[in-house]
Image: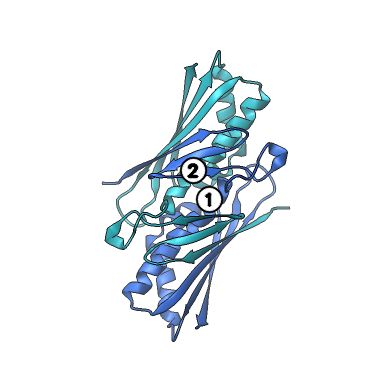
Chain colours: A cyan, B blue
Amino acid sequence: MGSKITSTLTHMDGLAFNVELGGHTFVIDSPNPKFGGKDRGPSPKSLILPALGGCTGMDVASILQKMRVPFTGLEVTVEAETNDQHPVYYTELRITYTVRGKGIDRKKVERAVELSRTTYCGVSFMLEPRSKITHEIVIEEA
Amino acid sequence: MGSKITSTLTHMDGLAFNVELGGHTFVIDSPNPKFGGKDRGPSPKSLILPALGGCTGMDVASILQKMRVPFTGLEVTVEAETNDQHPVYYTELRITYTVRGKGIDRKKVERAVELSRTTYCGVSFMLEPRSKITHEIVIEEA
């Protein structure tokens, strides 16, 4: 059986909305004053970046922990590129995984990233028909 | 020319990440203690809901303002349903637009929603290959 989730967005003023999501609240807004945005929170579309980076980042953190890879730091950056006409969407999403620690086995990190991409990460599964998703792994001995 | 945007996610502990996005910061986490989640913020995948609802909600707010529709309230709810195997993703996304005001012209609201869906909303464009997206409009005389 699948599960359900609901989010409620209440218009504030201009283009800002108050978001309720799983018991958490935050504000989204447009960063563009030309359209009445006041940058009071992230733009809705940009939430796609932490949705993707967080989904795969949690997979990788969890798999590395299970593999007993002794990482002391993990950073995931997502860079997105848009097209230039309506609808404006992310044509490319580049994920960089930076894993820090002593004697990190790159092969294990590659395996964790691969498992996320092919098996676990529902967000990359949803985005891949429209967006070219690429990744890079950086190991930092520290 | 398209534009670029970057988000950086820094692993905290367990499955939580600190997110930097367009100058705004927030925490994402898993709500599931079974996987080490502590629900310190929304889950990454769930950010898809306000990404979609906010994208189309901003379109609709903006178009209604241009059409001089005198709405006094606008609420957008997004309900998502998942499948039950990996990768877990949103098979269905149901959007409800509730517009409040005196003498709101339903046809104009329908037109605004339609313009968002077919022309402006890049998030629905990205999600529609995998997720069935439906919508409903509720007008509340107030």
Report the residue that reaches farthest toward the top. A103
Residue A48 sits above or below residue B55 on the image: above
Residue B90 sits above or below residue B25 on the image: below
The structure residue drawn at horizontal position 56% and vertical position 40%, both measured from the top left corner, is: A55
Q: Could you say where residue B141 lies in the image, as x and y percent from the top left? A: 50, 84
The structure residue drawn at horizontal position 52% and vertical position 28%, both measured from the top left corner, is: A74
Residue assigned mark 2: A50
At label 2, counting other C-alpha atoms closer than 10 Å, the crowd grade (few under 14, some 14-19, many 20 or more) is many
The answer to whether residue A10 of the structure is visible from this angle is: yes
Q: Amino acid at mark 2?
A: Pro
Q: Could you say where residue A12 lies in the image, as x and y percent from the top left? A: 44, 66
- Per the image, label 1 sits on a secondary structure element best described as helix
The structure residue drawn at horizontal position 68% and vertical position 37%, both measured from the top left corner, is: B36
Q: Could you say where residue B142 lies in the image, as x and y percent from the top left? A: 50, 83
Residue assigned mark 1: B47
Front residue of B39/A7: it is B39
